[in-house]
Image (spheres, rainbow, N blue to C red):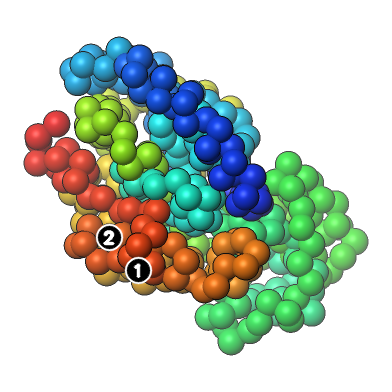
Amino acid sequence: MAQHRRNTMNKAVALLAILAASCVLLAGQALAGGTHRIAWSHYTGWEPWAYIQESGIMDKWAKKYGLDKVEIVLVNDYVESINMYTAGQFDGCVMTNMDALTIPAVGGVDSTALIVGDFSNGNDGIVAMNASSVKDLAGRKMRIVQLSVSHYLLTRALDMNGMKEKELTLVNTSDADIAPLFVSEAAKDPKAAVTTWNPLLMQVRNVKGANLVFDSSQIPGEIIDCLVVKSDTPDALKKALAGAWYEAMAQMSNPAASKEAIEVMAKSAGGTAAEFKAQLKTTKMFYNPAEAAAFAAGEQMKKTMDYVRSFSFDHGLYGEGAPSKDLVGIAFPDGSVMGDKGNVKLRFDKTYMQMAADGKL
């Protein structure tokens, strides 16, 4: 089952800024025509967008709010989808909280997390041969997609166990190669180790002698999956997207109505319904919009984003010459801002999730 969400090698901020500037006219023309484009890529928590498109739910909500068309576009390369959004080719894009900060926000694009859809609750993990704890990783080589949320997960695991990144040797490996390489190496290297995400995590865990020593359920609510839109997108589009999403969530959470939706999502992801359901078990989906709104507005979100911006700055994801982790302002639903209040480029907004919860969409 293909999932590409986590491969997030940082692109040059300067290039992104140039691309964004060059596409302003294109973006403006798209808005003027009443047609809007949302990019998504494969991941358990984002497969509902395939169902929203295929079922006609999106068309229904677009019509309700007077929009000519809302195109839900699958982009198989996750990082490229975010770069295209940053460059002005899409009005919105699915991405993690970390990537929303380090790519569009750092690139100067004012973006809003419109929908907080889920967080990883076991979908990301660290697996090692002949190990029973994170401390057993000392001195080992670790296959990982560097500068991704896997890297963030590893850093958090090490920190929670009193360890430093320099105690390991990180081996940057693409998500396409990481599982087969670990499987091959595990047969001859008793200290083989890997940090990855589902379904790759499922594959490496099945290797004889391999143990899961840490997963994202131990840092709940930190690897967050969102629908991010340009902050100045029309109110009608924001309402239509939220309405469509929570109609799909209502169907997914209703045993009597979920069969068709789950089958469409599983097929889109390239697997079976049983496999998709298994991955949903390690994905904390916010089916209830009130729960999503409360999570977005909670104090934990601030704590998480401080972890995320610290990791991002320390690992160079703010770009060369960035003076501090305060470079980019992050706004929260209570009106508070973390970082530079004069350069707010990432906003967590519960407005439309709350409207869905209150039946006002």
Q: CA distance from mark 2 to mark 1?
A: 8 Å
Q: Residue 20's x, y, as percent? A: 53, 38
Residue at left offset 41%, top offset 31%: 91
Answer with mark 2 or mark 1, whichever residue precedes in sequence: 2
Residue at left offset 45%, top offset 36%: 93
The answer to whether the residue labelled 2 contacts the one labelled 1, judged by CB atoms less than 8 Å apart, is: yes
| Amino acid type, mark 1 | Met
Question: For this rendering, which residue is in front, 155 or 232?
Answer: 232
SS of the residue under disc 2: loop
Q: Residue 109's x, y, as percent? A: 45, 46
Left or right: 83 with respect to 113? right
Left or right: 176 with respect to 13? right
| Amino acid type, mark 2 | Phe
Mark 2 crowdedness (10 Å alpha carbons): few <14, some 14-19, many ≥20? many
Residue position marked by numbered label 1 in the rendering? 338
Question: For this rendering, which residue is in front, 292 or 264?
Answer: 292
Q: Quadrant of residue 80?
A: top right
Q: Residue 71's x, y, as percent? A: 41, 19
Residue position marked by numbered label 2 in the rendering? 332
Mark 1 crowdedness (10 Å alpha carbons): few <14, some 14-19, many ≥20? some
Q: Specify the quadrant that holds the N terminus.
A: top right
